[in-house]
Image (spheres, rainbow, N blue to C red):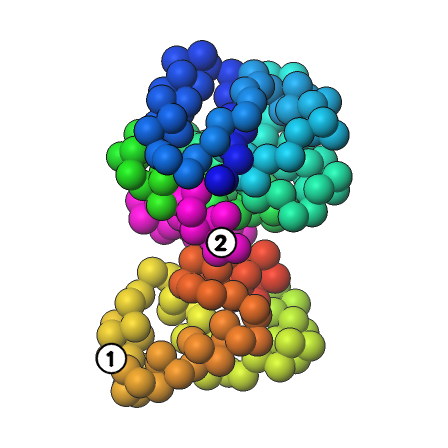
């Protein structure tokens, strides 16, 4: 069973999420909280696998809650439930340690996919959000990028492909843009995932953003 808690200040959204959870056989709802502080206060007494949390909440928002929750339980997996209007929080939630972002208006089956992926150790972003998350990230100075590349042994070709991936290009589009084979792109991405210990495009993009290896 995947044990889930909900942190959300709007009762209607909490009820909707509980309904979705109740319809999935191996999902178990174990608690609900109206803000981050309520959840942090309860955390020592509960053992959730995945936390579904709003970002902009009273008393304690999702960013601070995520920082505090992961300091107490580093293996906890947190998914942010968000609106497009929450863009200013995306970078903060990523750096705080959130593993997924799902739009509140997404289909219910997408939430199920997100929960399963994150519970399995992957990252998950709604497709509509992925580009927005990237666009909102602030650029960094060239020398900082070069220093990070040197430390992590990231080649110029790997950086170029990583940059294009973060700009939203598909494998095929990357191959056409830099005049290499599709296999070269796939091999390079596989090598990058090994270096960064990530498993998919979303994880690789999150890693690049968190470690400031690319300039967005």
Up-down relation of residue 98 to residue 200 (above or below): above
79 lies left or right of 46: left
Q: Is residue 31 visible?
A: yes
Q: Mark 1 or 2 closer to N-term?
A: 2
Q: Which numbered marker is on residue 108?
A: none
Q: Which residues are magenta?
A: 114-138
Q: Secondary structure at mark 2?
A: loop
Query: Tag count in the figure?
Result: 2
Instruction: State the image coordinates of residue 143 (x, y, percent, origin top left).
Output: 65, 71
Neighbour tally class for label 1: few under 14, some 14-19, many 20 plus, Cα within 10 Å: few
In which image quadrant can residue 67 be found?
top right
181 lies left or right of 211: left
Instruction: State the image coordinates of residue 132 (x, y, percent, origin top left).
Output: 39, 46
Up-down relation of residue 164 to residue 24 (above or below): below
Q: Residue at x 55, y 61 (%)?
A: 207
Neighbour tally class for label 2: few under 14, some 14-19, many 20 plus, Cα within 10 Å: few
Residue on which disc 1 sits: 176
Q: Residue at x 65, y 67 (%)?
A: 144
Instruction: State the image coordinates of residue 120 (x, y, percent, origin top left).
Output: 49, 53
Q: Is residue 215 visible?
A: no
Residue on which disc 2 sits: 120
Looking at the magenta stretch, what is its main secondary structure?
Answer: helix
Q: Residue at x 24, y 79 (%)?
A: 176
């Amino acid at each position: 069973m995947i044990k889930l808690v909900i942190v959300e200040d709007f009762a209607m959204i909490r009820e909707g999420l509980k309904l979705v959870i109740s319809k999935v056989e191996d999902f178990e709802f174990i608690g609900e909280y109206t803000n981050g502080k309520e959840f942090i206060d309860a955390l020592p007494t509960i053992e959730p696998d995945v936390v579904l949390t709003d970002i902009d909440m009273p008393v304690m928002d999702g960013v601070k809650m995520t920082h505090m929750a992961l300091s107490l339980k580093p293996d906890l997996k947190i998914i942010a439930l968000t609106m497009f209007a929450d863009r200013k929080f995306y970078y903060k939630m990523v750096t705080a340690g959130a593993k997924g972002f799902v739009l509140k208006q997404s289909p219910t089956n997408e939430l199920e996919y997100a929960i399963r992926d994150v519970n399995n150790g992957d990252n998950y972003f709604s497709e509509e959000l992925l580009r927005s998350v990237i666009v909102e990230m602030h650029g960094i100075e060239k020398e900082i990028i070069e220093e990070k590349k040197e430390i992590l042994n990231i080649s110029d070709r790997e950086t170029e492909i990583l940059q294009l991936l973060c700009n939203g290009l598909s494998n095929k589009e990357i191959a056409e843009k830099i005049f290499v084979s599709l296999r070269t792109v796939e091999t390079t991405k596989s090598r990058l995932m090994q270096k960064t210990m990530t498993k998919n495009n979303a994880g690789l993009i999150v890693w690049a953003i968190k470690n400031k290896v690319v300039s967005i």
